Structures are given as structure tokens and as C-alpha cells.
Amino acid sequence: MEREQQILEAAHEAGFDLAGLAPFHAPPDLERYRAWIEAGHHASMGWLAEVQPLLEDPRRFAPEGRTLLAVGVGHARAGVELEGGGRIARYAAGRDYHNWLRKRLRKLARTLVERGLVGGARSLVDDGPLMERSHAEEAGLGFASKAANLLHPRFGPWFFLGELVLDVELSPTAPPLPAGSCGTCTACLDACPTDALIAPGQLDAGRCISWATIEAREALPRELRAGLADWAFGCDVCSEVCPWGDGVPTQEERFPTSAAGEGSTLLSWLTLDPEPGAFEARFEGSPLRRPGRAGLATNAALVLGNRPQDGALPALRVVLEEDVSPRVREAAAWSLAHGYGADAGARTAVERAAARDRDPDAARGMRASLDETARG
Ligand code: B12
Ligand code: SF4
Ligand code: SF4
């Protein structure tokens, strides 16, 4: 059997659903990346601009690299509704996929070396300086879509990507035929709640709920807040409406619901313990850890404003007065003004907090919430 075939078989043995080989060179969609950064569509994710020189010439970070082994792993599961209300992206309910992929990629790297198929292999998942979707498409793992996601006829949009950088020159995998395409469909563009898909395949991250609820570290743009609707972490709308995802069987046994996912409610996020270490301990091994305590509490406050819950009002009032993070206090004010304004006490509490808050940005945000709701 040819070496390429042996490597792909080893990848399948290691538990990956999809595997393909591509040259280790600049991503075919490099120009799209450049234009995206230039337009500022990476929002607050400055690291995406910083890694651009490495991404343009991947041999700058892995000089030994000659071939990229791209792998894909399905993660379809049913939609996840938090107890009492609020939604999280499906992948976030399971254990962290980075760990799952990293562990198996490292094991696969050892196997390839032991079998004499490569001299060495370096693993990458998500956070490497790589345009993963573009390389994976070149390796035949799927096709680029109008939602910007890579789609596969068997997994729809529901699969993660990872890579091994191999130090041997290999023949690339021929892309599978038929490759598939979006055709005339525009369901994701039409359904995106915040109009983040500004053109087919182009996403303005600063408008995307996934960025807002996972990556943003400052107060959210006010015009985005209502658009979050009930999304408290990530967003699956563009994946859920995609016809390529219809009927994809669940992979829940692969990424069982984590304890953090199991115990999550909006109220519990709103009142997370700010003591150092408490948050990390509770969300260890879960993708929900990424935004940090203030991020999850902010998301919870905003969603509780969009979808008021019985029992949330007293908790929001305590957070408004006492939370250590100005961003969370300000989000609580937005929530009280927008979701609980019918309660006279709620509005008065926001007025008092706006007059007293020691953080000028938070105080300004609180006054803006009062103004917005006075007009409404
Ligand atoms: C930054 C980032 C984000 C940002 C920005 C997303 C974005 N679209 O760029 C935010 C936080 C918003 C985000 C959200 C999500 N992400 Co994300 N993200 C990344 C990351 C780290 C970099 C992406 C990047 O380089 N963006 C820059 C743009 C220019 O590059 P690109 O989107 O890859 O480029 C493709 C498209 O733009 C498309 N394209 C561009 N122009 C045009 C024009 C036409 C006509 C067409 C058809 C296509 C097209 O072609 C390119 C190649 O496929 C990658 C991991 C990685 N290192 O690559 C994960 C990654 C892309 N994310 C992933 C996932 C799962 C998500 C979410 C579904 C999570 C969620 N449920 O909330 C959402 C989906 C949002 C969306 N519709 O894209 C997966 C995608 C897997 C897949 N099958 O595609 C990745 C690959 C992580 C992984 N290792 O599995 N993400
Ligand atoms: S993840 Fe949600 S907000 Fe972002 S592009 Fe998709 S539908 Fe729009
Ligand atoms: S919803 Fe339609 S347009 Fe969007 S990615 Fe899926 S097939 Fe393409």
C-alpha cells in the first residue's frame, strides 16, 4: 500500500471520520483572509491579524513541514436548551473538543513515526496560525459554504477540524466528487439573527453572536444585544438551517455532556463565584470556560433581559450593585431596563446604580439603557 494510503488509514484508526493530505503551503483562500483582516472583520480578535505573516507562509512556524494531514471529526447532537431558558451552541455542551482532538492527533503522530511513515509530526487544533477551513478544503474534507463553514455531504456543518504537519513530501488527496455546493440556497444568510453574514462566505465577526458571547471581552455593542435573543454561548443558527445538516446522526457519545454543561443555567452563570480559581475549577475541560466568569455572567444577564425569567429580578439587582466587573454590572442594568422595566423598583435601581457606579463607562452604559427604554 502507498505511504499516503497508510497515513490516511492510520488517521481513521485513530478515530477521525475524515482525513486528507494537502501541500504545506499558503492557504488557497489567503486573499480572502487578507481582505477580511483589512476590513476589520476580525473585531476584537487582534491575534488573527498578528498571526497573518505565519499564516501566509506556514513554514515560518513549522520549517520542517512539507505536507498537511487535515482531519475532521463529526459532533452532531440535538439542540441544547438550558434548564429554565437560554441556549448554548451544541458543541459547548460536550467536553472540550480541543482536548479530544489534541490527544488523538498526538497519538496518531507517534504511530506515524513508529511505523516509519514520517520522521516527525506536529499537531494543531483551532488556535494554530492556520486557515484551517481553506487547507481542509484543499485536502478534500469538504466545500466552503455561504455560511463560511466547511460543509461535508455526510456531516453537514457539524464537524471539527484539526491537523498534523508532516515532515515528508506526499501526494495530495484528490478532492472527493461530487464536492457539493450551496447552489441557490441562501437559508443561512436569511436566518442569521444579527446579519453577520454580510455576503456569501463573508462574516463580520463583530456582528456574530458567536464572537459576542465567546470572544468579546468588553461591553457588547448595544445594537447586538437584543439580537442575541436566547443565545448565551455561541450560536448555531447558520448551521441549524443548513439543509446539508439534515438527518446527520448524533455523535453525542463521543462528546458526552460535561458536568459544566449539565449544571448550567442562566441564573447560575449570573451569580458565578468571582473568587480566583473557582470559575476555572468549575469549567475545567469545558468549552464554556473560554469567555471567563465575567463573559458568562454578561451573557446570562443579557439573555435574561431578552427572555425574562421568574426569580431573575432580585439576582439582577444584586449583580447590578455588587458584581466586581463593571461590564457585568452594566449588562445587568441593560437587562433590568429592557426586560423588567415594568417593575418600578427595577428602573429605580438602575437609576441609582447609574448615579453611583464608580466606573464611568459602566455608568454611561446604564444611563444609555435608561434612555433607550424611556423612549420605547
Ligand atoms: C476566528 C474563528 C471564529 C470567529 C470568526 C469566524 C469566521 N467565519 O472567520 C468566530 C468567533 C465568530 C467563530 C465562530 C464560529 N466558529 Co470558529 N473559528 C475561528 C478560527 C480560529 C479562525 C477562522 C478564520 O481564520 N477566519 C478568517 C476567514 C477569512 O477565514 P475562513 O472563515 O476560514 O475562510 C473561509 C470562508 O471565509 C470562505 N469564504 C470566504 N469568502 C468566500 C466567498 C464565497 C463565495 C464562499 C462560498 C466562501 C467564502 O472560504 C474560506 C475557506 O473555507 C477557526 C480555526 C482556524 N484556525 O481556522 C475556527 C473555526 C472556523 N470555527 C469553527 C466553528 C465550529 C465555529 C462556530 C460554528 C461555533 C459556534 N457554534 O458558535 C461559529 C460559526 C460562525 C461562522 N458562520 O463562521 C470551526 C469550523 C468547522 C467547519 N466545519 O467549518 C473551526 C474550523 C474550528 C475547528 N478547529 O473546528 N469562529
Ligand atoms: S453563528 Fe449565528 S450570528 Fe454568527 S453568522 Fe452564524 S447565524 Fe449569524
Ligand atoms: S444554509 Fe444554504 S447557503 Fe447556507 S451554507 Fe447551508 S447550503 Fe449553503
Image (spheres, helix red, strand yellow):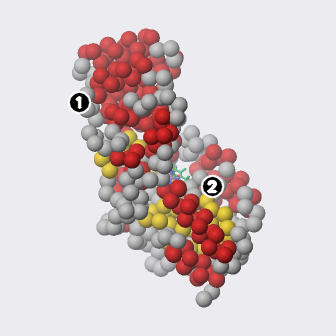
Which amino acid type is shown beneath numbered disc 2? Gly
Task: Locate residue 123 relative to residue 72 in the image: left or right.
Answer: right
Asked whether residue 7 is in view, the answer is yes
Cα–Cα span, label 2 and label 1: 43 Å
**Residue at 45% from the left image edge and 78% from the top image edge:** 178
Question: What percent of the width, then of the height, locates residue 328?
Answer: 44, 27
| 235 to 141, vertically: above or below | above
Residue 172 versus residue 278 in the image, above or below: below
Give the label on residue 157, or none.
none
Residue under numbered circle 2? 128
> Which mark is on residue 310?
1
Is residue 210 visible in this depiction of the protein? no
Residue 256, quarter of the rendered image: bottom left
Judged left or right of residue 123, residue 257 is left
Q: Amino acid at mark 1?
A: Asp
Residue 49: x %, y % from top left:
65, 46
Helix, strand or loop for disc 2: loop
Image coordinates for residue 26, horizontal then vertical, percent: 67, 63
Q: Nearer the viewer, residue 327 or 374?
A: 327
Helix, strand, or loop for circle 1? loop
Asked which quadrant contains residue 128, the reply is bottom right
Query: How many circles with numbers are drawn on the protein?
Result: 2
In the image, 191: left or right of 17?
Answer: left
Which image quarter holds the N terminus?
A: bottom right
